[in-house]
Image (tube, helix red, strand yellow):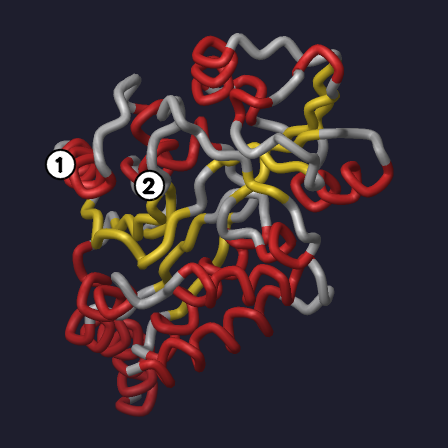
Amino acid sequence: RWLAWAALLALVAAPLVAFASQAATGRRTVTIGAKNFSEQFILARLVGRRLEAAGYRVTYREGLGSAVIFRALSGGDIDVYVDYAGTLWANEMKRTGTPPHEAMDAQVGEWAKQRGVTSLGSLGFENAYALAMRPRPGVRTIADLDAPSLVLGADLEFLDRPEWAALRHTYALNFKATRSFAPTFMYDALKSGDADVIAAFSSDGRVAADGLTVLADPKGALPGYDALLLVHDARLIPELRPLAGAIPVDLMRRANLMVDGQKQSPDAAAAWLDAAITARK
């Protein structure tokens, strides 16, 4: 009979020991969120690498839209993700001004804090919306565009976003047509002639690789888009804080190009980026 009691005690004790171990270390499964484009997949896996190295188990929820991902974080459905200051400023905070980057980042951080989210600050680069096109003589700014003769290509969200409304209003843009593409195919649309101008991303390696002209925004219609690392679970902060300010835009462009141009996996690009960040220290 004592053997039976010993077996029963072992069954009861095992989960208690596991629970005590997990409680002592604070380690658990962390859910990392991402939107639906390459940079987000890469950054999610970079965060995952750092957390796995610290002993966490990680899972990913990808393809979340800008309209839902912050609420998923503040509601605890995900634990960490990267968003962009201008996106939160315009879409979630419903703000329309364009303050300097540091002021915007600070205000976004305070707004997030009131919702149970900690911003660890900028990763060191911004991924701003920018209109881009193949070089044309005399066209250097958005104000130079002859919009009625041109087709605008954009990602699946841009044409419904307040940033597009601000651009359209500020520059009185009335394109001949607008077309939506998955982000990966916008650049192909320029090559094929399906679009003349695209709503590109400033950290996308294909902008430089394809020799595109990024049109200046002299009237300041668009806000800054610093990449902000947002955390719901404060226990993750010590492992992730070293990423703040650690990624200059040239490294992010190269990592993005590995996926979008060279067809490598986000895991491979994240591993390269992690090594490049470490090498810069």
Left or right of 108 in this view: 86: right
- SS state under label 2: helix
Which of the two discs, 1 and 2, sits closer to the camera?
Answer: 1
* Residue 209 position (above or below residue 71): below
Whether residue 115 is visible here, answered yes or no, is no
- For residue 73, the mark is 2
Residue plotted at (39% across, 48% down): 126
Seen from this angle, which residue lies furthest right? 192
* Residue 105 position (above or below residue 162): below
Classify residue 55 by image quadrant.
bottom left
Q: Residue 233: percent from the left, percent from the top?
A: 22, 53
- SS state under label 1: helix
Q: Nearer the viewer, residue 137 or 275?
A: 137
Identify residue type, mark 1.
Answer: Glu
Q: Nearer the viewer, residue 194 or 8?
A: 194
Left or right of 8 in this view: 254: right
Residue plotted at (28% across, 82% down): 281
Q: Residue 224: percent from the left, percent from the top?
A: 34, 37
Left or right of 68 in this view: 114: left
Name the residue that disc number 1 marks: 110
Dot 1: within a 10 Å radius of its alpha carbon, few (fewer than 14), some, or many (20 or more) residues?
Answer: some
